[in-house]
Amino acid sequence: MHRSVTARMFAGVLVAGAVLMVAREQGGFAQGRADPDLMTISRSGQVLRQTTTQAIFWGSEWNNPTFAGDVVTGLDTFFDGFHDSQLADLATEYYDRTGPITANSTYLGHVIDSTAPPAGTLTTSVVIDKACAIAGNNPNPNGVYFIYTSTPGNLQCALRTWGTCAKQKKPIQVVYIPHINGVDPPCNNVSIDDGSVTGHSGALAIYGNVTGNQIMNAITDPRGTGWKDSQGDGMSFKCDGIFPPAGQFFLFSNGSQWRIRAKWSNAAYLAGTGLPNLAGLKGCVY
């Protein structure tokens, strides 16, 4: 049930001090309403209309093929194919005052930083400083820098944050994902993809799902002023635990397939379509 967005136009209305998306699809306007289950964006809210990504593998262990397995090469494939993918397409119903999000994405490749990351869960300042250093304190303003450490953390699965680099205060968006082996908690749901179709290891399957969730949240809410509901949940978290039916995968532009959690669509919710989330609200699409 991949939803086409090629025939969509956009308009804005004010709802409770925020700009609420009203989608007009194939000639018909969906009816917007002041609903706490809808995602809204603040007046000065920001999205990433196109993205640039870079993967940073922090720790010398990533140079060891036994340790890395298919994760480094697999995530290269993920980011390379994200451009114009079915997943990226789902964000295009959202926008800010400069226009709608596009499915355009550029991958800068990966970097292996062989220095040792600090033990345990890293703080936001540590991951921002590392991403700024890799970017030479000149990050792409549309960039999302993903840091994958060789050490585990105590996070649920990932941490998404933002900040600025150096005295120039150039904005940067960062996602930090501690080491995942597909077995140990807290992020060990190997059942999401057995690899029979994708060829992915259990670890890569989880990395792909977590990365897919975080990149979509970063695109629609890069700096805390973007799209979320009254509880602060964005388009990935509103569909927490909801996957496409068995045997359904997100197709990427390079032909790779990924088993990733469904994403929230305001348009589907208003139309009463999509899969129900854990609260029973329809609107999760894939």
Image (cartoon, rainbow, N blue to C red):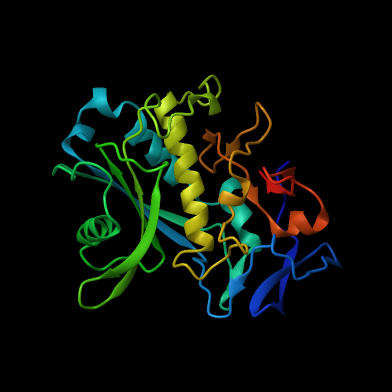
Residue 42: % across, % down: 57, 75
Within the image, what quadrant is residue 245 found in? top right
Residue 220: % across, % down: 54, 62
Farthest-out residue, right: 28
Instruction: Say left or right for 133 vs 233.
Output: left
Give above or below for 190 relative to 4: above
Residue at position x 44%, y 67% in the image? 223
Give above or below for 135 relative to 154: below
Farthest-out residue, left: 115
Within the image, what quadrant is residue 78 found in? top left
Residue at position x 62%, y 64% in the image? 230
Quarter placement of the C terminus? top right
Give above or below for 6 relative to 276: below
Q: Is residue 241 at least partly visible in the picture?
A: yes
Instruction: Say left or right for 29 vs 159.
Output: right
Residue at position x 53%, y 80% in the image? 44
Residue 211: % across, % down: 44, 44
Quarter placement of the N terminus? top right
Q: Is residue 236 at least partly visible in the picture?
A: no
Q: How many marks?
A: 0
